[in-house]
């Protein structure tokens, strides 16, 4: 049987303790947070590491304003893709963005640049012309131009 010290040092225990510490840290500056990458400064203690929940991380780093901006980014990205949901690339990109967000609820969201990859895929899909505007050119037009 595990004692309290073992539970606190287990993977679940450490994550739970980090989330509690991150939440407490956010409460010290709820509107604007304590700053980006606060956990690298060393001034917030041993549990001030990257939160394994993107909501807690955004609240601690940039407060309510930062979380609001993050939520708006997610809504705008997925909404842009879903407006053109007939494009398979955009459906895949929206799924990647939502998948990254779901993963960020249980693991570090901003890890090693991988958070940008779904948005790159989404940007490539949005940069393409919509399928409706890619109608083939009038085939008879070339014949008329040649003076037939």
Image (spheres, rainbow, N blue to C red):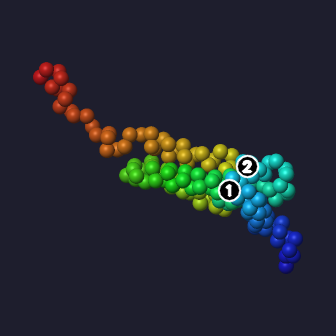
Secondary structure at numbered mark 1: loop
Residue 127 visible here: yes
Q: Residue placed farthest to the bottom in the image?
A: 1
Kindly identify the residue that appears in the image at 85 percent across and 56 percent down.
45
67, above or below 129, in the image? below
Image: 37 above or below 47: above
**Front disc: 2 or 1:** 1
Disc 2 target residue: 35
Q: Which of 76 and 132 is in front in this view?
A: 76
- Residue lying at the far left in this picture: please name it: 148
Q: Of helix, strand and loop, which one carries label 2?
A: loop
Which residue does the image show at 54% across and 46% down from the upper left? 119
Residue 11 drawn above or below residue 48: below
Which quarter of the picture shows residue 58? Answer: bottom right
Q: How crowded is mark 2: few (under 14 residues within 10 Å), some or many (20 or more)?
A: some
Which residue position is annotated with label 1? Answer: 31
The location of residue 49, given as percent across then percent down, is 78, 55
- Across and down, in percent, residue 125 comes to 45, 44
Which residue shows up at 51% across the image and 55% down it? 75
- Res. 134 image quadrant: top left
Q: In this view, does 58 lie to the left or right of 129?
A: right
In x, y percent, where is residue 126?
45, 43
Percent x, y of residue 36? 72, 48
User: Residues at badges 2 and 1 in contact (C-beta under 8 Å)?
Assistant: no
Tell me which residue sits at (54%, 43%) in the image. 120
Furthest-top residue in this view: 147
């Amino acid at each position: 049987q595990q004692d309290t010290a073992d539970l606190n040092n287990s993977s679940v225990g450490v994550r739970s303790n980090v989330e509690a510490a991150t939440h407490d840290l956010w409460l010290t500056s709820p509107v604007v947070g304590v700053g980006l990458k606060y956990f690298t400064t060393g001034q917030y203690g041993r549990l001030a590491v990257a939160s394994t929940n993107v909501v807690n991380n955004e609240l601690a780093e940039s407060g309510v304003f930062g979380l609001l901006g993050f939520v708006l980014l997610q809504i705008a990205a997925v909404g842009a893709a879903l407006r053109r949901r007939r494009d398979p690339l955009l459906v895949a990109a929206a799924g990647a963005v939502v998948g990254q967000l779901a993963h960020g609820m249980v693991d570090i969201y901003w890890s090693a640049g991988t958070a940008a990859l779904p948005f790159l895929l989404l940007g490539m899909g949005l940069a393409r012309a919509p399928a409706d505007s890619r109608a083939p050119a009038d085939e008879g037009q070339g014949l008329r131009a040649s003076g037939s």
